[in-house]
Image (cartoon, rainbow, N blue to C red):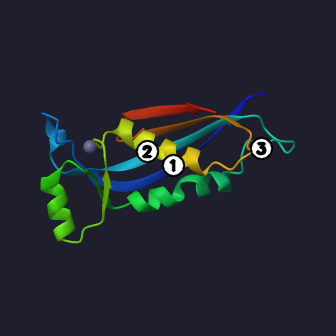
Amino acid sequence: MLTTISKQFRWEMGHRLPFHEGLCRNMHGHSYEAHVILTGHPDDHGMVMDYYDMKWLIQDKIDELDHCFLCDASDNVVLDFLQSHSMKTVVVDMPTTAENIARLLLEHVCAKLPAPNRITSVRVRVYETEKTYAEVEQSL
Ligand SMILES: [Zn+2]
């Protein structure tokens, strides 16, 4: 029977959306939360994947992002400032929307999934606030 399991992760991170015409163009931060959601066929022990292994799939990326400023590579004003003051910075080639952060995490998880595995789909849901999230899915 197809079964879905999920594990939550939290980190603090700064960002801004230079293209945005409202408040989001300003430098600000969020207490982010990600849910890694795996669907698959349980093994003989009734497990889709050990929760410890789920943590291994993504914790290194969470640690990289925690207390960094996630900076769009095209945002030269902020990037110059961060790099000239030795701030923890992660540079990405995309706007730092919740949608794109979810995709970044999904690609990381899918690249680290051991083969073979029992997983048929991977979803990552990223909460920017308690009320808003973006979710992406990859079928395997
Ligand atoms: Zn924001």
- Could you tell me if the residues under marks 2 and 1 are in contact, i.e. CB atoms within 8 Å? yes
Labelled pair 3, 1 in contact (Cβ < 8 Å): no
Q: Residue 134 lies in what quarter of the image?
A: top left
- Residue type highlighted by circle 2: Leu
Label 3 beta carbon less than 8 Å to ligand 1: no
Q: Which mark is residue 47?
A: 3
Q: Look at mark 2 in the image and give the residue it sits on.
A: 104
Q: Position of residue 109 (x, y in %)?
A: 55, 47
**Quarter holding the C terminus?**
top right
Q: Quadrant of ligand 1?
A: top left
Q: Is residue 15 above or below residue 3?
A: below
Q: Residues within 10 Å of mark 1 (few under 14, many from 20)?
A: some
Secondary structure under the numbered disc 2 in the rendered image = helix
Identify the mark at residue 108; answer none if there is no mark. Answer: 1
Position of residue 27 in the picture relative to residue 89 (left or right): left
Give me the C-alpha separation between circle 2 and circle 1. 6 Å
Q: Amino acid at mark 1?
A: His
Left or right: 8, with 28 as reference point: right
